[in-house]
């Protein structure tokens, strides 16, 4: 039967085999190629070094290869003519799902084969979110092991006092998030977080990280707008100011200004880019201004003579708001 006219009825196999995996060694495992099916040997595999033999039991030529979980070829491709066998010796497999494939007939002739190992874990972002709280971002992977769970423990660094222990089930070869939000911790205290993955093949090497909770931020930020000495449009065209978060600060979030201008019965407000007409009775309109190293500057585009009123306020990460003194002046051209 010509390959162009053959009906492709190959098997797409995903093998998460529950039988006890074979240990890596010197034995040769045979993969049978037919027209148009690919059948890897039955049974599970431990991660390690294996030798595979591709036997072509069909009537047409096939090209056999082994691809990593990332889709990169780790062995082959080798051309296997009808009736012949080609060997791929000493192929190293890390834990994961590998694809056994005929590159000439990839749609029908492919199978995913699991190579299992001991699970492992890793940490992402870890840090304090308040004086009594923190977040832990971690990932665990079972690496195909069975009866797997990840244990996340939190202890006081130095004393080893256990604060929290959390078990999360994990399975397969995909990462499982085991992150936690931790509340009720002591402020200004250093903690150690440890992640271990347990399975039938044993426990992973523990991975650990530390973080320190912050002291309580109880004070609001302080913002000030500098008042130019001269009452001219030119002197007030660019406003300067400072903002700080005193005490045990978790950080300054942002600063906002409100600028209004009145001349006679006509009023305008600044949008952050330009002045627009507004009701003289309107409430103050605030906009955010960039701040760097506790300082900010704002150029007022379109400023003209009249009465200017500048209000300011600052916000910190802890949620406090600090309002600055209102600054006003009658500007001349």
Image (cartoon, grey):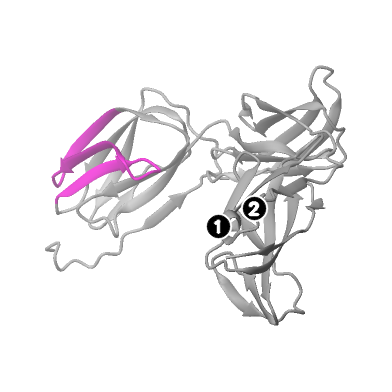
Residue 312, by quadrant, is bottom right
Mark 1 to mark 2: distance in Å? 9 Å
Q: Name the residue under label 1.
A: 234
Q: Is residue 193 magenta?
A: no
Q: Which residue is drawn at 85% across and 42% down?
A: 219
Q: In this view, does 165 lie to the left or right of 42?
A: right
Q: Is residue 21 left or right of residue 168?
A: left
Stretch of the chain drawn in magenta: 61-89
* Magenta stretch: helix, strand or loop mostly: strand
Q: Residue at x 79, y 37 (%)?
A: 246
Q: In this view, does 146 lie to the left or right of 95?
A: right
Tell me: residue 277, above or below residue 146.
below
* Viewer-closest of 169 and 239: 239
Q: Mark 2 points at which residue?
A: 230
From the top left corner, tell me how far across and down residue 147 is, in percent: 67, 40
From the top left corner, tell me how far across and down residue 258 is, in percent: 69, 63
Q: Residue at x 79, y 21 (%)?
A: 157
Tell me: residue 25, above or below residue 263.
above
Residue 30, by quadrant, is top left
From the top left corner, tell me how far across and down residue 65 is, in percent: 26, 42
* Viewer-closest of 180 and 3: 180
- Which image quarter holds the C terminus? bottom right
Element at label 2: loop
Residue 127, by quadrant, is top right
Viewer can see residue 317: no
Viewer can see residue 213: yes
Q: Does the magenta stretch include residue 79?
A: yes
From the top left corner, tell me how far across and down residue 73 is, in percent: 29, 40
Tell me: residue 152, above or below residue 7.
above
- Which image quarter holds the N terminus? bottom left
* Viewer-closest of 333 and 125: 333
Q: Mark 2 packing: few (<14 Cα in 10 Å), some, or many (20+)?
A: few
């Amino acid at each position: 039967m010509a390959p162009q006219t053959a009906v492709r009825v190959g098997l797409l196999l995903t093998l998460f085999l529950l039988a006890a995996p074979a240990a890596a060694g010197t034995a040769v495992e045979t993969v049978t190629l037919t027209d148009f099916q690919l059948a890897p040997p039955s049974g599970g595999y431990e991660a390690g070094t294996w030798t595979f033999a591709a036997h072509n039991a069909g009537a047409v030529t096939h090209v056999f290869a082994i691809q990593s979980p990332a889709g990169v070829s780790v062995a082959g491709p080798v051309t296997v003519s009808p009736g012949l066998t080609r060997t791929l010796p000493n192929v190293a497999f890390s834990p994961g799902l590998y694809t056994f494939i005929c590159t000439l007939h990839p749609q029908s002739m492919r199978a995913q084969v699991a190579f299992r190992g001991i699970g492992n874990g890793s940490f992402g972002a870890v840090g304090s979110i308040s004086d009594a709280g923190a977040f832990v971002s971690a990932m665990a992977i079972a690496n195909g092991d069975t009866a797997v769970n990840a244990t996340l423990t939190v202890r006081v660094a130095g004393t080893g006092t256990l604060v929290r222990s959390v078990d999360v089930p994990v399975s397969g070869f995909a990462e499982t998030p085991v992150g936690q939000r931790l509340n009720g911790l002591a402020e200004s205290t250093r903690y150690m977080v440890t992640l271990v993955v347990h399975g039938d093949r044993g426990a992973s090497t523990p991975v650990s990280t530390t973080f320190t909770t912050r002291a309580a931020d109880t004070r609001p930020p302080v913002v000030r707008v500098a008042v130019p000495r001269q009452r001219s449009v030119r002197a007030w065209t660019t406003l300067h100011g400072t903002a700080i978060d005193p005490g045990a600060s978790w950080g300054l979030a942002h600063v906002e200004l409100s600028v209004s201008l009145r001349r006679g019965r006509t009023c305008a407000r600044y949008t952050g880019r330009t002045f627009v007409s507004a009701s003289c009775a309107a409430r103050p309109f605030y906009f955010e201004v960039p701040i760097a190293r506790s300082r900010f500057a704002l150029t007022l585009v379109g400023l003209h003579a009249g009465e200017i009123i500048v209000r300011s306020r600052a916000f910190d990460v802890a949620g406090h708001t600090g309002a600055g003194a209102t600054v006003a002046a009658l500007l001349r051209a």
